[in-house]
Amino acid sequence: MELMVPIDSQSDCPLYEQIYEYIKNDIRKGRLEAGSRLPSTRVLAQNLKVSRSTSQMAYDQLLSEGYIEAFPCRGYFVCKIDELLEVKQKETAVFAQKKEEERSYQVDFSPRGIDLDSFPFNTWRKISRNTLVDDNKEMFAAGDTQGERALRMAIGDYLHSARGVNCSPEQIIIGAGNEYLLLLLSRLLGREMSIAMENPTYKQAYRVFCGQGHKVIPVKMDKYGMELKRLEASRADIAYVMPSHQYPTGIVMPVARRQELLSWAYRGSRRYLIEDDYDSEFRYKGKPIPALQGMDMGGRVIYMGTFSNSIAPAIRVGFMVLPEPLVSLYREKAGFFSSTVSRIDQHILYQFITQGYYERHLNRMRAIYKGKHDALLSGLKELEPFFSMGGEYAGLHVLLTHLKGMTEKQLVEKAAEAGVKVYGMSDYFIDTKENKSSSTVLLGYANLSEKDIDRGCRLLKKAWLQQ
């Protein structure tokens, strides 16, 4: 049968989700009858003008939820859905969601928060006021499409001294957050490029790639990061990695594995590594790990960073360092896009960096986060016989894995009953079959006071150790 699905390429919703939702609703409403045969993923992809991986992901989701079933050599068929059961399940899901929304937590160990109480408001206000003094009309005119050159030079100087990144201002592109820069990169490289991602990984990047129609291949990790044999077997064109502090596992990739990744990239004519260096500023043991980009002698590493963690998420300034061979391609395919960060914000950030405020702010935040980090480890000390800890020497969260058989779901639920919100590792897996951490939860501490951290730890001990 032919199946036409309305696709909105301008929507924020990924293409595979649009296909999945449309087919699911047709099955629920009876427009697709039980037993009817669906087109193959190849035919559907051709009809909708999307990649085959996009149609496959939509079918995989429908399969996992029981709306369709697959028979070898025959194809995909619509399952019989019990209407009463569906309504019951829907009501149960709505009730559970409402219950979760209504539940109030005494302590929320969010791994994505930062300490906004320590934001340098007075400094930022002073620089903002100086930027607009004397009716500075230039700030309101269109600027450089790659971002203000002065800011790009300041970022390049900082990256070289702090992260060992080697680049010129011409290689740096400034954008409103990494999501936008990934969209730009997708246009640059082409949607036909397949992307390997660590499993588990940063889901927002995964959603962006899928939404752009890329084939995304989850690659299992070992204790050193992405496994090279599995990366080779994936036949991917690009590998998206977080070598300095993998999110969410906290793994720091050793030099040997980084060299192996570079060798992999050099063996293909169009292979690239995307290095997401999202929170390298915060490390509590040993020296900072230099960026993978600094080791790249062949122009294959695309380096990405952001000021969201180091300053504030609302700043919405990210940056991407392209290898020199891609700079001319950028100007050809995307150089006409206007910068998505206002010149005023760029100038404020430029002053913040060049006048030494950024370095002082980082030093202060490292000390604050180190205090919170130590308070959390101290508070969790009594859990050591029952839990193993990971990722505790860098970043803004730690991992706890129960050693005595309690599942992730039980850990989350027991914590919630005690008024504490923790986050399950399973939420970060692309391929859930590879989830071997079903007893692992994440505890972030950046947006909590040391007093709240202490209280949260006491509540968790009571919840998890009480028999």
Image (cartoon, helix red, strand yellow):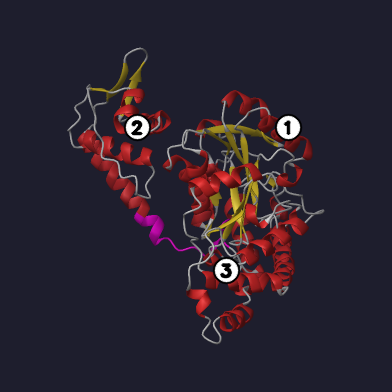
Number of the label disc, if any, that sits on residue 462 = none
The residue that disc 2 covers is: 62
Whole-angstrom CA distance, mark 3 to mark 2, is: 45 Å
Whole-angstrom CA distance, mark 1 to mark 2, is: 37 Å
Instruction: Please name the amino acid that badge 1 sits on.
Output: Glu
The residue that disc 3 covers is: 346
In the figure, 399 relative to 71: above or below?
A: below
Specify which label sits upstream in the sequence, 3 or 2: 2
Instruction: Please name the amino acid that badge 3 sits on.
Output: Gln
Relative to residue 232, is residue 283 drawn left or right? right
| 214 or 384, nearer to the observer | 214
| Residue 112 lies in the magenta stretch | yes
Callout in the foreground (1, 3): 3
| Residue 443 lies in the magenta stretch | no
x and y percent of residue 68 in the render?
A: 31, 27
Specify which label sits upstream in the sequence, 1 or 3: 1
On the question of residue 467 being in view, the answer is no
Q: Which residue is rendered at x = 35% and y = 25% of the image?
A: 41
Q: Quadrant of the N terminus?
A: top left
Specify which label sits upstream in the sequence, 1 or 2: 2
Around disc 3, counting alpha carbons within 10 Å, would you say few (fewer than 14), some (14 to 19), or many (20 or more)?
Answer: many
Whole-angstrom CA distance, mark 1 to mark 3, is: 37 Å
In the figure, 338 relative to 248: above or below?
A: below
In the figure, 452 relative to 433: above or below?
A: below
The residue that disc 1 covers is: 260
x and y percent of residue 396 in the render?
A: 65, 57
Name the outermost residue toward the right. Answer: 286
Q: Which residue is rendered at x = 73% and y = 73% of the image?
A: 356
Chain part drawn in magenta: 98-113
